[in-house]
Image: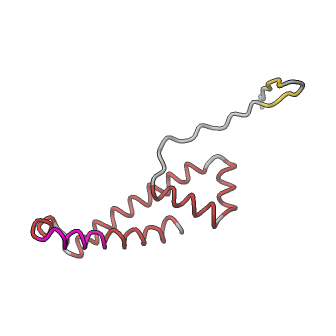
C-alpha cells in the first residue's frame, strides 16, 4: 500500500480518497429504498455506506423498480382494456383507470423490490 500524508500543524494526516460515486440521479424508488434502509435495516445501510457501495445499490434497486413498474402498468392496462380508444371516447374514465393501475403497480413494486 502506498499511503501519502499531509502535514497539518504537528500532525501527519493520511490522504484518503474514496472511490468516485457512480453517475446517476436518485429518484423516487431509489430515495425510498435509502430511507427504508436507513430507518429499518440500519446494519445493511451502514455496511453499504462504509464500503462505498450505497449509491450503486440504490441505483440498481431504482432501475429494477422502474422496469418492474413500467411492465406492471403495461400488463395491467392491457388486461383492464385501457387503450387509446378508451382515452378518446371517455377521457375521465381512462384517467381514473390509469391512476388506479399506477397506484396498484406502485404498491406491488414497493413490496417486492424496494422493501424486499
Residue 106 in the image: above or below residue 14: below
Q: Magenta stretch? A: 90-100
Residue 115 belongs to the span the image colors magenta:
no
Residue lying farthest to the right in this orientation: 10
The part of the image, by quadrant, that contains residue 14 is: top right
Q: Which residue is depicted at the point 25% across and 73% down? A: 97
Residue 80 in the image: above or below residue 5: below
Residue lying farthest to the bottom in this orientation: 80
The quadrant in which the N terminus is found is: top right
Q: Which residue is depicted at the point 28% across and 72% down? A: 76
Q: Position of residue 79 (x, y in %)?
A: 24, 75
Q: Which residue is depicted at the point 36% across and 70% down? A: 103
Q: Position of residue 93 (x, y in %)?
A: 19, 73
The quadrant in which the C terminus is found is: bottom right
Q: How many marks?
A: 0
Residue lying farthest to the front in this orientation: 92
Q: Which residue is depicted at the point 39% across and 63% down? A: 68
Looking at this view, is 17 or 3 the one in front? Answer: 17
Q: Position of residue 16 (x, y in %)?
A: 73, 34
Residue 96 belongs to the span the image colors magenta:
yes
Residue 3 in the image: above or below residue 25: above
| Left or right for 107, reference 41 | left
Amino acid at each position: 500500500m502506498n499511503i501519502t500524508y499531509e502535514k497539518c500543524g504537528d500532525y501527519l494526516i493520511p490522504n484518503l480518497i474514496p472511490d468516485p460515486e457512480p453517475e446517476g440521479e436518485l429518484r423516487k424508488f431509489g430515495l425510498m429504498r435509502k430511507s427504508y434502509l436507513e430507518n429499518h435495516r440500519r446494519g445493511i445501510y451502514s455496511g453499504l455506506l462504509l464500503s462505498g457501495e450505497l449509491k450503486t445499490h440504490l441505483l440498481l434497486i431504482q432501475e429494477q423498480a422502474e422496469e418492474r413498474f413500467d411492465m406492471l402498468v403495461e400488463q395491467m392496462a392491457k388486461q383492464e382494456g385501457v387503450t387509446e380508444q378508451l382515452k378518446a371516447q371517455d377521457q375521465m374514465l381512462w384517467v381514473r383507470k390509469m391512476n388506479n393501475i399506477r397506484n396498484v403497480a406502485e404498491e406491488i413494486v414497493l413490496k417486492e423490490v424496494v422493501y424486499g
